[in-house]
Amino acid sequence: PVAEADVMGLARIRSRYRVRMPDAVALHLAIATTSELATFDDALAGAARLAGVVVVNRRLGLRVDLGAGSRDDRRNRRR
């Protein structure tokens, strides 16, 4: 179940990044927990990058980070 506190955040993400609701849930969770997002979906990956989320695609061996200034920049430097 979706927590009541997450409803508005999900609606904002769905509207702002123009993603389907299942993708909005995955993106919201990645943003809320400052996690990386693994996906094969190009639209979701693009939305995640716009939101400053690190996108991982293990099948292709890709890890796509935004440059300096992204919210994940400090975390990525420690790896």
Image (spheres, rainbow, N blue to C red):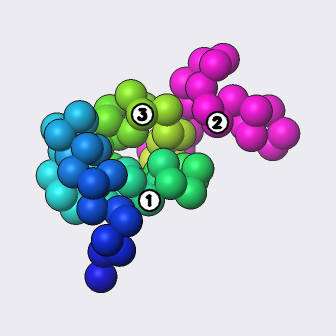
Secondary structure of residue under mark 1:
helix
- Callout 1 touching callout 2 (CB < 8 Å): no
Q: Residue 51, which numbered label?
A: 3
Question: Label for residue 72?
Answer: 2
Q: How far is disc 1 from disc 2 in space, using C-alphas?
A: 15 Å
**Is residue 63 rendered magenta in the image?**
yes
Give the magenta-colored segment's residue range. 59-79
Is the residue marked by circle 2 packed among few (<14), some (14-19), or many (20+) residues within 10 Å? Answer: some
Q: Is residue 5 above or below residue 42?
A: below
**Res. 62 visible in picture:** no
Task: Check disc 2 and give the amino acid type.
Answer: Asp
Mark 3 element type: loop
Residue 42 spot, x, y in % from top left: 27, 39
Do labels 3 and 1 touch, CB within 8 Å? Answer: no
The residue positioned 44% from the left and 59% from the top of the image is: 29
Upstream in sequence: badge 2 or badge 3: 3
User: Which residue is at a point 39% across and 28% down the rendered structure image?
Assistant: 50
| Residue type, numbered disc 1 | Leu
Residue at 74% from the left image edge and 40% from the top image edge: 75
Proximity of marks 2 and 3: CB atoms separated by less than 8 Å: no
Separation (CA) of disc 3 from disc 1? 12 Å
